[in-house]
Structures are given as C-alpha cells and as structure tokens.
Image: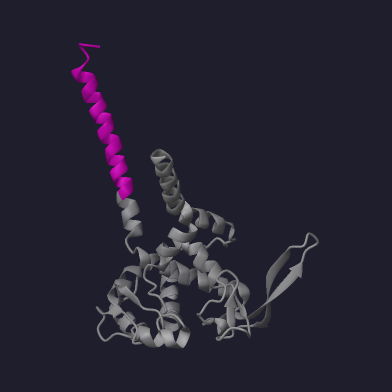
Amino acid sequence: MKMRLLNLIKRAAAALLFAPAVAMAAGAALHLDKAPVSTDPAALQHGAKLFVNYCLSCHSASFTRYNQLQEIGLSEQAIRDNLMFTGERVGDLMKVAMRPAESKVWFGVAPPDLTLVARQRASEFGSGADWLYTYLRQFYRDPARPTGWNNAIFANVAMPHVFWQLQGEQIAKVTQNADGTSTTALELVKPGALAPAEYDKAVADLVSFLVWMGEPIADKRKTIGVVVLIFLAGLFVLSYALKKNYWKDIH
C-alpha cells in the first residue's frame, strides 16, 4: 500500500513538473514569420531611433546605458542630440519617467522592461526575434478593446498599436472553411506612411536592435568561441603527437 501511494505521489510530481513543457509544446503550433535580424550598424542605428521615439515613452531598457550605443557606431554627440529623451547624462540608464503603478492603472498592466525581451520570448517560443517580428506586424482594429487594437498572436493585448501611423490600419477577416474550421487573415484597409515592405524593414531593424540590446557582446562572444575551439583543436593535435612520441617504444 505504501509503495502504491509512493508511486502515485511520484506520478503527480512528474505531471506537475512537465506540465509547463507540455503547455509550451501545445503553443509551438503558433506560426511565426522569420525575422531578418541584422548586425549591420545602419540597421541597428535605425532600430535604436525607432526604439527611443516609439517605445521608450512607456517601456524602459533599464539594463542599458545610452553610451553603450557607441558600440553600434554612434558618436557620443549623436546620442546626445538625437536619442537622449529620458536621461541627462550619456552614461544614464535608458529608463522612463512613467511610474509602474500609474501605468498599470492606465493600461491594466505595467509595460515591461524591454532590455531582455528578445531572450525572454526565445525561452517561451524558441525564437524571440521571430516572435517580436511577427507580433509588431499583427495588430488590427478591434473596437471591443479599450485601446481599439488587438493582436493576432497576442490576444487581448493591453498595448496599443504605436506604429499605426507607419503601418496603417488592418482588420481581421474570418473565413469559414469547408471542413468547419475558420481562417483569420489580416487585411490592410488604410495605408500608413510606409509601404508594407518598408514597414517590415523598419520592424526588422527594431527587432535587430532589441536582439542586440539583450546581448551586446554576442558577436564578440561568438568570435572568442571560434578562437577557443581552434586553439583546443591545435592543442589536441599537439597533445596527441606528444602522446605518440612518449608511447612509441611501448606500442
């Protein structure tokens, strides 16, 4: 009886342990568009411009300092003149003045910090860049929502479509299939300031900046990794040759 009870406890614990993984696997069917992430300085600089103009009013990047943007090719003076909207010194963190308690009242939830958003979404969906790229292009008009906007991959999202002037306005059209299922597609009914291809490029640049901000030393880390692997490969060859020389009279 005790063994049976112990087995039941083990099974229940295993079910609780793997429940999040099962839920994540169930959500893996979500279609995400491939994000054309770039490390080109021009793309990252354009992404930084979009971020401070459209995102930084609500979302902070409190693990990044303005002077870190010099790593993507911007001069200190250019940062001061064009990107410092919330700080006084170039070494300040990229924070916002809006208080979390107030923003929770206005939006229903406090806007999250975006420094690590690409890495966070990667842990949930496999690719944070793909999720962000899809999300920022899937807003549509929904009069039932408090902001007037909804999102195809983030239902009932609290965030309004801050890029609507660039993208335009989309509506969701539901088509009933012969097998009883339905398909939802977004249709652009009011063009924005950018053509669809131009808007996709702008979103790609913003996503590239968010990915860079989550790990600014990613390229350096990869370069060091390659150098270390080459060194270890050379060390292995020398060690093997030394071993052969030591043991040549025995084998």
Residue 45 seen in the current view: yes
Find residue 122 and report its horizontal and vertical position in percent. 45, 60
In percent of width and height, residue 74 lies at 34, 74
Q: Magenta residues: mostly which secondary structure?
A: helix
Closer-to-camera residue (18/178): 18
The answer to whether one can see residue 37 in this image is: no
Query: Which segment is the magenta one?
Result: 225-251
In the image, is residue 186 above or below residue 238? below
Residue 197 located left or right of residue 129:
right
Q: In terms of depth relative to the viewer, which is nearer, 108 or 16?
A: 16
Q: How is the rendered protein coloured?
A: one colour
Q: Residue at x 28, y 38 (%)?
A: 232
Let me know if residue 112 is in the magenta part: no
Q: Depth check: 54 or 14 in front?
A: 14
Q: Which image quarter is the N terminus in?
A: top left
- In the image as oriented, which residue stretches furthest toward the front? 1
Image x and y of residue 105, in percent: 43, 87
Q: Residue at x 63, y 82 (%)?
A: 142
Instruction: Report x, y in % for residue 64.
Output: 31, 72
Q: Quadrant of the C terminus?
A: top left
Q: Residue furthest right?
A: 178
Q: How many marks?
A: 0
Residue found 74% across the figure and 63% down from its top: 181
- Residue 26, quarter of picture: bottom right
Quadrant housing residue 85: bottom left
Is residue 19 toward the left or the right of residue 226 in the image?
A: right
Please report the residue visible at 41 percent of the width from the left and 73 percent of the height from the top. Answer: 45
Q: Is residue 233 magenta?
A: yes
